[in-house]
Amino acid sequence: MKNYTHSVQYYETDRMGITHHSNYIRWMEEARIDFLRQIGWNYEKLESLGIISPVTEVNCKYKASTTFSDEVSITVSVEEFKGVRLKLRYAMHNTSGECVCEGTSEHCFVDKQGKIIRLHKEYPEFYQTLTSLVEDKQS
């Protein structure tokens, strides 16, 4: 799995020249979209199947600051998947390899009416893909 890379934009910094904390959560979303694309389940495909994946929880632990034009490499991994809820872990590093932020996001899967989808029954291929990523991590 290839890491997602984000270049810090000028507008993402505050008056002190430091990246505003809210942007790290946006970068998590960018990395998540890229992650799903890499595993063959991009957002366009999910939405065309009627699968919506809202965020139910998000957290960030800021470790070091970033500034304009810094490159941030973001690793996404499946922390936990129990069929209904998916928890992803993010690790963000600068070009020196220093960890600048760690975070997680949790998601559920619902249809267009907001009803919970049981992936193992309704979308077994997607379920198996996510399950295998948890198993790979535990190996």
Image: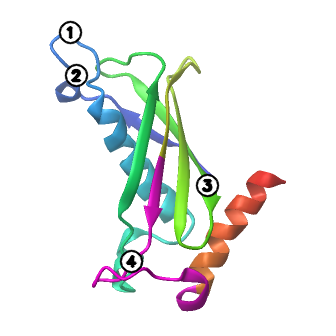
Q: Which mark is residue 13?
A: 2
Number of the front mark, 4 or 2:
4
The CA span between labels 4 and 1 is 41 Å
Which amino acid type corresponds to the residue marked 2 in the rendered image? Thr
Which amino acid type corresponds to the residue marked 4 in the rendered image? Val
Identify the residue shown where x is 27% and y is 85%.
Answer: 113
Q: Do tag 2 and tag 1 residues touch (Cβ < 8 Å)?
A: yes
Q: Is residue 65 magenta?
A: no
- The scheme the figure's colours follow is rainbow
Q: Position of residue 67 (x, y in %)?
A: 32, 17
Q: Secondary structure at mark 4?
A: loop
Q: Which mark is residue 110?
A: 4
Q: Position of residue 41 (x, y in %)?
A: 49, 72
Q: Do tag 4 and tag 2 residues touch (Cβ < 8 Å)?
A: no
Relative horizontal placement of residue 74, taking residue 124 as reference (left or right): left
The magenta span reads 105-123
Which amino acid type corresponds to the residue marked 1 in the rendered image? Met
